[in-house]
Amino acid sequence: MNYGLSSVKFSSHKTLVILLVAFLFATISTQAQDVAEGEKLFKQNCTSCHQVKKQVVGPALKGVETRWADQGLLIKFIQNSQSVIKSGDAYSNELYKKYNQTIMPNHAFLTDANVQSILAYIKVEAEKKEEVAKGTEGEEGSAQKEDEGISDLAIWGLVGAVLLLFFIIGIMNRVIGTLERVIKQKNGEEITEEDELKTEAFGGLKKLAKNRTVVVGSIIAFIITMSVVGYRDLMSIGLEEGYQPKQPIAFSHQLHAGTYQINCQYCHSGAFKSKNASIPSANVCMNCHKYVQLTEKYDGAISPEISKIYTALDYNPETQQYGTNQKPIEWVRVHNLQDFVYFPHSQHVKVAGIACQKCHGPVETMKEIVQYAPLTMAWCINCHRETEMTHAKDNAYYDRLIKAHEMLKKGEKMTVAAVGGLECAKCHY
């Protein structure tokens, strides 16, 4: 009976240990997941005004969970700061006055669990030791290494190695031929012309040069090869697929459009309303980078790439004042169409609803922008053949086309004006 009782106790202890280990593992996994989610939410919603260890628009968030006596009130403040301030809470009103009555944006879309994840991430990030990465590449791509591919030196080195190999083979053939000739002479055998060629370094090549079939075949192969290469090069004149120029500022689309998910048209606003997508002015950059400076990786100094924006605008980040010595940022255009090509961005983006990636490729993955598509006439025509055109609701252009077709079916008189022939852009573009 005692053995049975001991067995039960042992089993109970074993089960308890397993449950504790499982609980501990689940807790660690949940915390890791919360921190990862918190990092993502923090970067999407908080970085424009806050940093963990440095004050920008709002206070540094290190230790924020200890500065609020009521954690529930902190969560409510993050979700809707104005409601907490209006409730008369002393600490929230003190913050409001301290930061010049700057209204914190409403984050009501964040659940309590979302906010707790953000706070978990802030706590973990605040506890990290300062890691200064002087001279290293910043997250924004401040010193991106150029992927230069195979260099000219490597190509010529390979050619040189092949020529050296042929030279060594020629010398070896000559040594072998000489030895064979010596053996024949010793044995009293007759020395033929072929034996004489073998004693020369490139005797084998001379022998092939006397073969008419080999010579004619080589000439034909050379002509065909050069014709193919020449045709390919001629057809690629003016094509810039893969073009990736060095820009004055290492702007990372991967960081802005990918990690932070900034809409393309926030910077390229012209794509929605005009022919050109337009290059954003430095003032658009300053909407964020007046506050976002990325100093933690540069020993408290402002990111070198963001400093270039400040230099162009003659902006002093300490006084937040603009000077008079302002210069434009000389961006290098990547996508160029011929002057005779009329490509309206608005018609493709707004009317057709085509995503930017259709022509520009996965820009959200590009550290440096590169011409993704060939942008040839054949490429555009193929897209027009494959893209399905749908009749957008309340679209006057398509409504008019349908009306014109109905008139044709009924045999009614129809003029060019009925299908948009009076629009100025038909001729004047």
Image (tube, grey):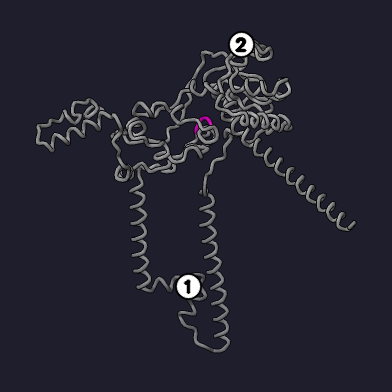
Q: Along the line of sight, which residue is nearer the eye, 348 or 247?
A: 348
**Residue 51 visible in the picture:** yes
Residue 203: mark: 1
Residue 427 appears in which quarter of the rendering?
top left
Kind of residue indicated by mark 2: Asn
Q: Position of residue 244 (x, y in %)?
A: 47, 39
Residue 250: say if magenta: yes
Q: Is residue 11 above or below residue 79?
A: below
Is 428 placed left or right of 232 in the picture? left
Q: Is residue 47 above or below residue 380?
A: above
Q: Earlier in the sequence, mark 2 or mark 1?
A: 2
- Quarter of the figure with the N terminus: bottom right
Kind of residue indicated by mark 1: Gly
Q: Is residue 389 above or below residue 284?
A: below
Instruction: Point out the stretch of residues depicted in magenta.
Output: 247-251
Residue 100: mark: 2
Overall secondary structure of the magenta section: loop
Question: Residue most toward the front?
Answer: 1
Q: Residue at x 53, y 30 (%)?
A: 249
Dot 2: few (<14), some (14–19), or many (≥20) neighbours within 10 Å? few
Q: Position of residue 164 (x, y in %)?
A: 54, 62
Judged by depth in the image, the label closer to the viewer, 2 or 1, is: 2
Are the two marked residues, 2 and 1, in contact with CB atoms closer than 8 angstroms?
no
Q: Residue at x 28, y 34 (%)?
A: 340
Dot 1: few (<14), some (14–19), or many (≥20) neighbours within 10 Å? some
